[in-house]
Image (cartoon, rainbow, N blue to C red):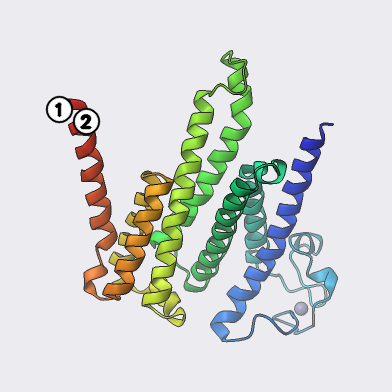
Amino acid sequence: MDPEVVLAIINIVMAGMFGAVIGSFTNVCIYRIPEHRTIVKGHSMCMTCGHELGALDLVPIFSWLFLGGKCRYCKTPISSRYIKIESLTALMYILMACTHLSMFLDPADPKKNMFQFVVLCALLIMTNIVIVEMMIMKDTGSSMYVMSVALLIDLAVQVLFKVLDPVLSKALGIVSSTEKGAMSILGDLTVQIAVGAAIGFVAVFLAVLFTNNAKNLSRYFSDEKAKALRTSDLFAIVLCGCIGIIPAIVCAVVYLVSRIVIGNGKKVKYLGTYMAAGAAVGYFGYEFIRVFLK
Ligand SMILES: [Zn+2]
């Protein structure tokens, strides 16, 4: 087998295992943070019989499957939430690894790899923070929830394009691999949207951190009054995804600075919406002038 393929498979499997472990830790966070308990120390135990759990009870995904979803000691059913979060996180990490294979396979370009790596880390950390927040707040209506679902779908689409690209190029009769097939252009587009959105996501997250304090982060997700702000933030993220990577960085910095300078008052409520509307007018205005007034 091609050593590159072997390396790719190893990396995908490792990413899945790492994801399952992170998912397991995510479960600990979801359970302990609302009870104001530490997430770094202490043994896990059965919530019914209080029996301390051993290493064999704590293997992500597999323990739940082998124990049939029941406690080994008292046979009380264990919530399926554990295996759901663990497998979802594993799947997320596998998808991310699939879309970033060149990071592992192309050591010749360390600058490109470093950039991809930073984006990858940001995406992974953000997505897990969102999962923890949403599980704690039982929040499935906010823009942040919509955003993370969109991110997951986008990743799946990227993987699909990666898989389909060589097949379709061949079917369409494009022999040279350097020639761009329609699929690889679409693939590039999704990567651009994902990276742009990730930049916007980081800016929004930092803005929330700086304008609230970290303690109030859960209120940002749950507060009915913050709904307009969340929707506005979503617009800013979408804007960053649409306008390309370099303008997204500029836009994200402007958004971040404005949010921090203005604070958390009523004035920032529609900031993202205004920026998105302004960018749309600017973009289409420019296109209009370029095409029709030339
Ligand atoms: Zn038990």
Instruction: State yes or no: discs 2 and 1 in contact (Cβ < 8 Å).
Output: yes
Badge 1 marks a residue whose secondary structure is: loop
Question: Which kind of residue does numbered mark 1 sit on?
Answer: Leu
Q: Quadrant of the N terminus?
A: top right
Q: Residue furthest top?
A: 173
Quarter, ligand 1: bottom right
- Residue 73's spot in the image, x, y percent? 82, 77
Q: Residue at x 59, y 13 (%)?
A: 173
Q: Is mark 1 within 8 Å of ligand 1?
A: no
- Residue 253's spot in the image, x, y percent? 37, 61
- Vertical placement of residue 139 versus 212, above or below: above
Per the image, the residue denoted by label 1 is 293
Q: Residue at x 50, y 51 (%)?
A: 151
Label 1 Cα neighbours within 10 Å, binned few <14 / some 14-19 / many ≥20: few
**Depth check, front residue: 43 or 285:** 285
Per the image, the residue denoted by label 2 is 290
- Residue 171's spot in the image, x, y percent? 60, 16
Q: Residue at x 82, y 72 (%)?
A: 72
- Vertical placement of residue 103 versus 33, above or below: above
- Vertical placement of residue 136 versus 215, above or below: above
**Marks 2 and 1, Cα distance to the nearest angstrom?**
6 Å
Count of numbered marks: 2
Q: Is mark 2 within 8 Å of ligand 1?
A: no
Which image quarter: residue 255? bottom left
Q: Residue at x 62, y 56 (%)?
A: 88
**Depth check, front residue: 191 or 257:** 257
Label 2 Cα neighbours within 10 Å, binned few <14 / some 14-19 / many ≥20: few
Which image quarter: residue 209? bottom left
Question: Which kind of residue does numbered mark 2 sit on?
Answer: Arg
Q: Is residue 17 left or right of residue 182?
A: right
Q: Quadrant of the C terminus?
A: top left
Check residue 271 in the rendering and tell me which mark sits there, or answer none.
Answer: none
